[in-house]
Image: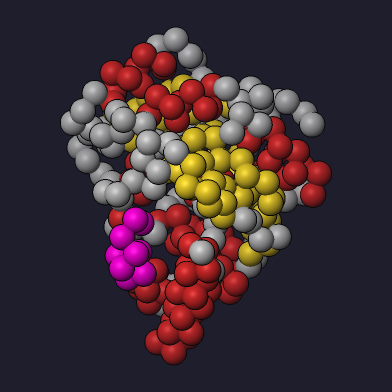
Amino acid sequence: MKRNKLVSIITPSFNSARFIEECILSVISQTYINWEMLIVDDCSQDNSVDIISKFSNNETRIRLFCLEKNVGPAEARNIAIRNASGKYIAFLDSDDIWCSNKLEDQLKFMEKNNVEFSFTSYQCVNENGDDMNKIIKAPKKMTYHSYLKNTIIGCLTVIIDKEKTGHFEMPIIKSSQDMALWLNIMKKGFTAYGLDINLAKYRIVSSSNTSNKLNAARDVWQVYRKIEKLSVLYSMWCWMNYAYNAIIKRL
């Protein structure tokens, strides 16, 4: 695999002092070294910026953007995307972690199979980083209509070849921005291909919106109706499948 293909890693940060160092260290430890990490701090009120600056001052591949007003995670990611220089765009939230071979193995998979949009399996950990004995396995592929019924793509695992898909940004909505973006890309005819290897750790934080299953289910419904503008009947059908798959995923 050619090593001259830059990966831009998109990381929004808000009051992330508890976890951001471990997140950054997991990027620095990557066996694939041609990356840049764009961290957008969304007016944190803790010492997140001090921690991030400690790394960005000594590692030229880490770029810190400090916002003057809070814009939310979708726009924070979009600011990073607009400033990204890479052929590939990868996503990693400030409380999540990558395995050291994540970029190398996933890019090999994408180049070997001529894939524009890929994702992988990932492991769930608790707030302390302890293994919860649960791995979310990546299916072989997801299309627009299959993803509507099974939102299994972990944002922390996604890599997209921007040169092939064209420019994209996340919709400015309260939650499920990643779901809406994946649907937007797949609606253009791109398929998301899964690599069934555990290459990341998703931290389940009690204060996050996705940890509240009722809120998460409501947000998915809003994407169906307000973003995708699906009919009520088709939305209900997709939502029932989503709920079933969400239960299976937790078993």
Res. 31 visible in picture? yes
Tell me if 199 is positioned left or right of 53 in this view: right
Please tell me whether the stretch drawn in magenta is mainly helix, strand or loop.
Answer: helix
Q: Residue at x 36, y 21 (%)?
A: 52
Q: Residue 238, image x and y in percent?
A: 49, 79
Q: Residue at x 47, y 69 (%)?
A: 247
**Residue at the extreme top:** 58
Q: Which is more toward the observer, 178 or 98?
A: 98
Q: Which is more toward the observer, 87 or 209?
A: 209
Tell me if 109 is positioned left or right of 18 in this view: right
Where does the N terminus fall, quadrant-wise? top right
* Residue range of the region highlighted in magenta in the rendering: 210-219
Q: Quadrant of residue 66?
A: top left
Q: Residue 86: say if magenta.
A: no
Q: Quadrant of residue 180?
A: bottom left
Q: How many marks?
A: 0
Q: Residue at x 22, y 33 (%)?
A: 43
**Residue at the extreme bottom:** 233
Q: Which is more toward the observer, 81 or 192?
A: 192
Q: Residue 184, image x and y in percent?
A: 51, 62
Res. 151 visible in picture? no
Q: Is residue 117 above or below residue 59?
A: below
Colouring method of the image: secondary structure
Q: Residue 24, image x and y in percent?
A: 46, 26
Tell me if 94 is positioned left or right of 244 in this view: left
Q: Is residue 225 above or below residue 182?
A: below
Q: Residue at x 68, y 41 (%)?
A: 106
Tell me if 62 is positioned left or right of 32 in this view: left
Q: Residue 51, image x and y in percent?
A: 33, 20
Q: Is residue 230 above or below residue 84?
A: below
